[in-house]
Image (cartoon, helix red, strand yellow):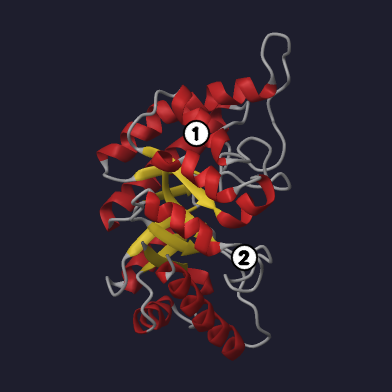
């Protein structure tokens, strides 16, 4: 298992400075985000990192114009097409830089399609739209040797995929194609799962990437999530993927934030060593 940090969490004023900090502090990967320019921003960040630290993944989706876009389940066909085409471009980028995949919550908030019961519920309609999207995205990701990673979020952010089992259901309905997997976020799991280690065990073969945050949504070690229990399950599953920080870093000043991040990295490494 390898530790990555989202670029925005790393101390430094430029991407190059952040990459050097990550390298000097033993961070094994950097997760890029699409906010602020989409694919073009990712390309600029990758150029600035210049191979000093591997790019672990890309978080989020953007349309071809670089605008954040999570319209995979929108009733508007044009919006869905923009989401899919934007994702295809980012998946190609992931393949080019050797990233594990693109992390995508397919929708935020409530459903945008109507409830057509008794014909089909909103969730059933969304399943159909998601399966259709995966029919394009999964083979495209596989062709570029990367993954489209579905991310379940907690109930306050997303209605559609809230538990790992929800993402597994969609993948299985789509025929479990290569090129698609699950991003498991321990913060969201702490809210939605009744037993996070068991949820990881049950969805194990579909889980390819993890996001780390404590229940405080600050860095690991600031709350009460049992990281050791989660990591033990990942070891059982022979998980060799990325553990990427997606959280806020506590501290009132840049110096405090840097010190707290270093402390948290030591905490996670210690958790990984425990049997």
From the top left corner, tell me how far across and down residue 264 is, in percent.
53, 77
Question: From the image, which quarter does the C terminus lie in?
Answer: bottom left
Q: Is residue 37 visible?
A: no
Question: From the image, which quarter does the N terminus lie in?
Answer: bottom left
Q: Is residue 49 above or below residue 91?
A: below
Q: Is residue 26 visible?
A: yes
* Residue at image coords 54%, 32%: 80
Q: Of label 2 and label 1, which has the lower sequence position? A: 1
Tell me if mark 1 has few (under 14), some (14-19) or many (20+) residues whose alpha carbon lies within 10 angstroms of its own. Answer: many
From the top left corner, tell me how far across and down residue 205 is, in percent.
39, 40
Circle count: 2
* Residue at image coords 54%, 85%: 258
Q: Residue furthest front?
A: 275
Residue pointed to by mark 1 = 168
From the top left corner, tell me how far across and down residue 132 is, in percent.
47, 24
Indicate the quadrant where residue 213 lies.
bottom right
Q: Is residue 27 above or below residue 164?
A: below
Residue 214 image label? 2
- Foreground of the two, 110 or 50: 110
* Residue at image coords 35%, 52%: 100
Residue 24 image label? none
Q: Is residue 258 above or below residue 193?
A: below
- Dot 1 falls on a residue whose secondary structure is helix
């Amino acid at each position: 298992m390898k530790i990555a940090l989202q670029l925005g969490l790393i101390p430094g004023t430029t991407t190059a400075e952040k990459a050097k900090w990550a390298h000097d502090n033993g961070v094994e990967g950097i997760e890029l985000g699409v906010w602020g320019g989409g694919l073009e921003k990712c390309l600029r960040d990758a150029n600035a990192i210049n191979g000093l630290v591997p790019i672990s993944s890309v978080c989020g989706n953007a349309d071809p114009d670089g605008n954040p876009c999570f319209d995979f389940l929108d009733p508007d066909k044009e919006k869905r097409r923009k989401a899919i085409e934007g994702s295809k471009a980012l998946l190609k980028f992931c393949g080019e830089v050797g990233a594990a995949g693109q992390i995508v919550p397919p929708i935020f908030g409530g459903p945008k399609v109507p409830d057509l019961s008794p014909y089909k519920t909103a969730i059933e309609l969304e399943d159909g739209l998601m399966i259709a999207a995966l029919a394009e995205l999964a083979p495209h990701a596989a062709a570029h040797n990367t993954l489209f990673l579905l991310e379940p979020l907690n109930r306050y952010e997303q209605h559609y995929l809230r538990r790992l089992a929800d993402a597994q259901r969609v993948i299985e309905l789509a025929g479990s194609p290569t090129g698609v997997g699950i991003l498991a976020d321990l913060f969201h799991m702490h809210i939605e799962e009744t037993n996070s280690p068991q949820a990881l065990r049950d969805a194990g073969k579909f889980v390819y990437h993890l996001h780390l945050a404590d229940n405080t949504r600050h860095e690991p070690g600031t709350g009460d999530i049992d990281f050791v229990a989660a990591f033990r399950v990942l070891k059982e599953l022979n998980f060799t993927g990325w553990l990427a920080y997606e959280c806020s870093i506590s501290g009132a000043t840049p110096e405090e934030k840097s010190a707290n991040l270093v402390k948290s990295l030591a905490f996670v490494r210690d958790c990984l060593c425990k049997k």
